[in-house]
Image (tube, rainbow, N blue to C red):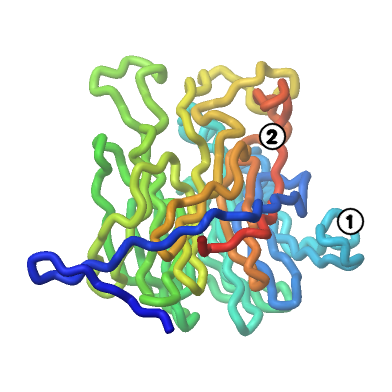
Amino acid sequence: MITTILFTLAGCSISPPPICSPIKISPVVETVITGLENPRGVAVSLTGEMYVVEAGTGLHLLDPTKWDGKLTKFTDLNGDGDFEDKAEAERWFSHFTTYNGFSAYGTGRDEVSGPVDLLLHSDGRLFLSVDDGGLSNSMALHVISPEGRIGLTLADRNNMNGIAFDRDQQKIFAVESGLNMLIEISFTGEFRDIVLFPFLDSGQQAVPAGLAVDPITGNLLVALFSGYLIDEQAESIDDIISFVVGDAKIVRVDPDTGKITDEIVDLTTAVDVAIDEAGNIYVVEMASTPTKLIPSSFDLYDPHAAPIHGGYLRYSGRVTLYPANGCQPRVLAKGLDAPTNITIGPDGALYISTGQGTPGRPIPGPDGVTTIVGEILRITNFSGEH
């Protein structure tokens, strides 16, 4: 029999601190797909098929015939645990929008966007959000049949960088990074604004980048990435700070009232979040430290260009588990190259997209100069409990 003892102070009941035992297992981090071009959303079926969207190369925004944003279905035909054989990849779509914020807007950061997030409904339909940066009138949330055909476009809004089903899979929530908004979308294409996120502690925009639905409460967890910090007296790109270390956070939002409360603070570039059935929270931070921005004259597509970071320190991303029982958070993977998305598979594994930026561009690596390569990582052998 287990007895819970409540401590009482001034008439208030206080639960005792959690008992946290040492962790005796180490997470296993494996690469299950490599050679991708800016992988973003991942969806895994009950039978093990994996659907991956890629934002592409960022080239040819103004020429739709050369767009290379992709959606691919991967099947582990030989049962070896990865999806590396060519026969295991079935390309469904190859010409979604792709653009680079550096080229399109002069951001000074190597950031490629296009298809950005993906959901798999229990009836087999896929829901895919596409971001064009407002440049080609192709921002959309597409519904794709189990056979791989695009049907209804549910919404044409701002850049919906993160999408999530509600607990009953009867509607979709989305974050619009460009507008700092959280919205609700019905399956008939109607939308409702839930909340506009306020500025963060240092005065920069919130930039909501990812979200998840708490299966216990129905509340939303939203990753606030944090935006530029601009010097009021700025005269050049060198006076702009990509982000402030420690200003990003995860907030909890009541979808009915729009009430915002801080869930996890003191994060840096919180780009996505996930939560499992037990209430354990998983946070992806894309980079730990800002670096110099990219000069406007730099050629992102020169294979012999100088290896520069470009606003974000490469190979400094991480995935952290925040246990539901209140024990100390644990880093499950670190030293990742610009991770962007996280998905919890039906097998309980975590699937992480890495390699944000121009594919093949030289960058500083942990062992010397390397190049940007998009990959899907799988994290297993961890537990949410201490």
Residue 14, compared with residue 224, is above or below; it is below
Using the image as rendered, state which of residue 187 and residue 82 is in the foreground: 82
Instruction: Classify mark 2: helix, strand or loop.
Output: loop
Q: Name the residue at 84% across, 65% down.
A: 76
Q: Label 1 belongs to which residue?
A: 86
Q: Name the residue at 43% across, 65% down.
A: 324
Using the image as rendered, state which of residue 346 and residue 125 is in the foreground: 346
Residue 167 location, x and y as percent? 45, 79
Residue 9 location, x and y as percent? 13, 65
Q: Label 2 belongs to which residue?
A: 372
Q: Name the residue at 55% across, 39% down.
A: 317
Quick check: can you spot residue 188? no
Quick check: can you spot residue 104? yes
Three-letter amino acid code at the position of disc 1: Lys
* Left or right of 279 on screen, residue 91: right
Circle 1 crowding by C-alpha within 10 Å: few under 14, some 14–19, many from 20: few
* Left or right of 307 on screen, residue 138: left
Q: Quadrant of residue 199?
A: top left
Instruction: Classify mark 1: helix, strand or loop.
Output: helix
Residue 88 location, x and y as percent? 86, 62
Using the image as rendered, state which of residue 179 and residue 313 is in the foreground: 313
Three-letter amino acid code at the position of disc 2: Ile
Residue 107, compared with residue 261, is above or below; it is above
For the N terminus, give its image quadrant. bottom left
